[in-house]
Image (spheres, rainbow, N blue to C red):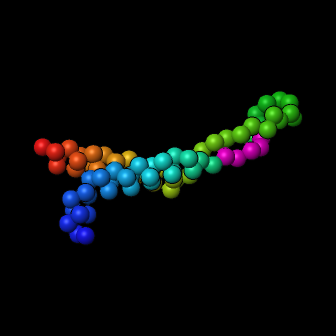
Amino acid sequence: MKEKIKKYFGEILLVIGSFITTYNVFDFRYSRGCGLSLSLSDECNNPVAYYYADDTLMMIGIGVALLVIGILKIRKKGQ
């Protein structure tokens, strides 16, 4: 089992990295409401703001790093 993990380490990193990245890209959050309105009228059109939390951004970065490392390992193995 250990030799199979060592043999396919690049592919494993590629799969894990793509899963982590995809899962966290779709983990955006949103908030509704006017918040501070700088307009002169009291009317609010109920805006929506989409954003990523700090931990989600960090996990996207880790996922992309694992993808790149996996690709580099696979390319190095092929040479």
Residue drawn where x is 77% and y is 43% of the image? 33
For this orientation, the residue located farthest to the left is 79
Image quadrant in which the C terminus is located: top left
Q: Is residue 29 left or right of residue 58?
A: right
Residue 11 drawn at (x, y percent): 30, 52
Which range of residues does the magenta coloring cover?
Answer: 30-34
Residue 32 included in the magenta stretch of the image: yes
Q: Is residue 18 left or right of residue 69?
A: right
Q: Is residue 70 left or right of residue 56?
A: left
Dividing the picture into quarters, in which one does residue 49 lie? top right
Image quadrant in which the N terminus is located: bottom left
Q: Is residue 61 visible?
A: no
Residue 61 drawn at (x, y percent): 41, 49
67 is higher (above) or lower (below) than 1: above
Residue drawn where x is 51% and y is 51% of the image? 24
In the foreground, 65 or 15: 15
In the foreground, 46 or 70: 70
Q: Is residue 67 left or right of residue 57?
A: left
Dividing the picture into quarters, in which one does residue 42 lie? top right
